Image (cartoon, rainbow, N blue to C red):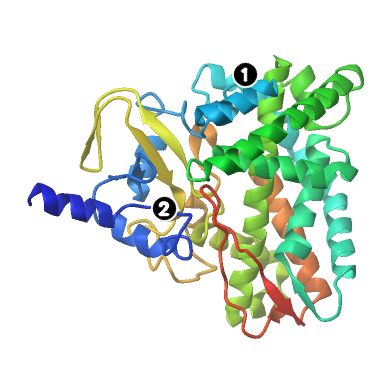
Amino acid sequence: MTTTESSVEDAAFDFNPMVSPHREDPHLFYRAARERPPALSATLGAYMVTRYEDLLTVIDDPDTYSSKAALPMIYDNPPEVVDELRRGGVPETTMVVNEDEPEHERFRRVFDAGFTGARVRAMLPTMRARADELIDGFDGDRADLVAGYAIPFVQTVISAIIGFPAEDTARVQGWTDDVNTLWNPLAPVADRVASASRMAEYTRYLQALVDDRRAHPREDLLSDLVHGANGFPGLPDEYVHNIVRGAARVAGFDTTRDAITATVLLILQNDDVRERLLADPVKTIPKATEEALRRDAPHRGLFRITTRDTELGGTALPAGSPLLLLFGSGNRDEARFPRPDHVDLDRPNVRDHLAFGRGLHVCPGAPMARAEIRVALETLFHRLPGVRLADGFEPTYIASFFFRGLESLQVSW
């Protein structure tokens, strides 16, 4: 193959989840990408890892594939964005997901305290009450289950877990959207500058909460981070800022919102699944949830960087090579999941999916997220057993670098 032919072929395998056609359906691209070794995306500046076995190779070898670049740092932005952050005194440290061992354990063990089984159980009454309240507020016989249900439901839960006052939800959500923009290397620079300008107020707001928890600890994640947990001391203030605004608020909100709506969509698009759920919700909802997580992982993937020269799936990777782990592709790898595009509630290996990661950096909030999905679905289908997709509804997806989520989910009953 000539150099020109190779360049044309590589261009055809470039990946940009922000625009068509990859925004609407990345799975067509994933399927084709799994037929060849990991390839470099010129748009993303990273090698795309799409095969399940290649993903496991990377995840299970943290010595060769470092997590130092798992998520972008907001100070890696262009100079005009960085200048705005510096003017605002916005702190930045590495995040839990960006730490390798041995440093990782200290941060992870403190972070884990916010998502224990006891904390999950303690949140169930809040989840049920909020789900009922939102359904009570539906107007008429139609609703958008993204804006009118999943978003406010998850906002309530994650605010309570972290320790944000309920009345500050809208402000915190705006700042969370700003963090997402600053993480997105494909976002317009002007948008990133605007987001950076609002981070100074977020920094002051978080510091006030940190100071309050230092003096008056409560049963929330903020208090765990400030005072320590699981035999590990509290973290410096700047680490608390970074964990709360990133791993806790962004990851704890976007992924759960999208998982709820993806699961509802799967149920409403498949009459046999809906019938099983209505007949036996206790058994069916967990099965539908795991299959939805497999088919449409709410988090697109994380980055890794090679620490030495290595080879992955037939591609030679020099030390310092960035990789993007595309979990959504691995979850539909034919070599791991037969008939991967088919909805199968009884798929024997469905829990092998990578929607919540695996290994050292498996999502600490996965049990809480599963509980949120279960309560949201139990309440919805108990209160509105006749819910169905609105006439003419066609799924469309948000333009997001990291997340795979519906723009809306229009239903009627």
Cα distance, mark 2 to mark 1? 35 Å
The residue type indicated by label 1 comes to Arg
Residue 174 screen position, x and y as percent: 74, 45
Work out whether residue 23 or residue 137 is closer to the camera in this orientation and state it: 23
Work out whether residue 34 or residue 374 is closer to the camera in this orientation and state it: 34
Tell me if residue 238 comes above or below residue 249 in the rendering.
Answer: above
- Residue drawn at point x = 47 percent, y = 60 percent: 23
Residue 197 screen position, x and y as percent: 68, 33
Work out whether residue 44 or residue 344 is closer to the camera in this orientation and state it: 44
Apparent side of residue 121 relative to residue 54 in the rendered image (left or right): right
In the rendered image, which residue does mark 1 sit on? 106
Mark 2 or mark 1, whichever is nearer to me: 2
Tell me if residue 60 comes above or below residue 368 in the rendering.
Answer: above
Secondary structure beneath label 1 = helix
Residue 246 screen position, x and y as percent: 64, 35
Q: Quadrant of residue 290?
A: bottom right
Secondary structure beneath label 2 = loop
The tag on residue 401 is none
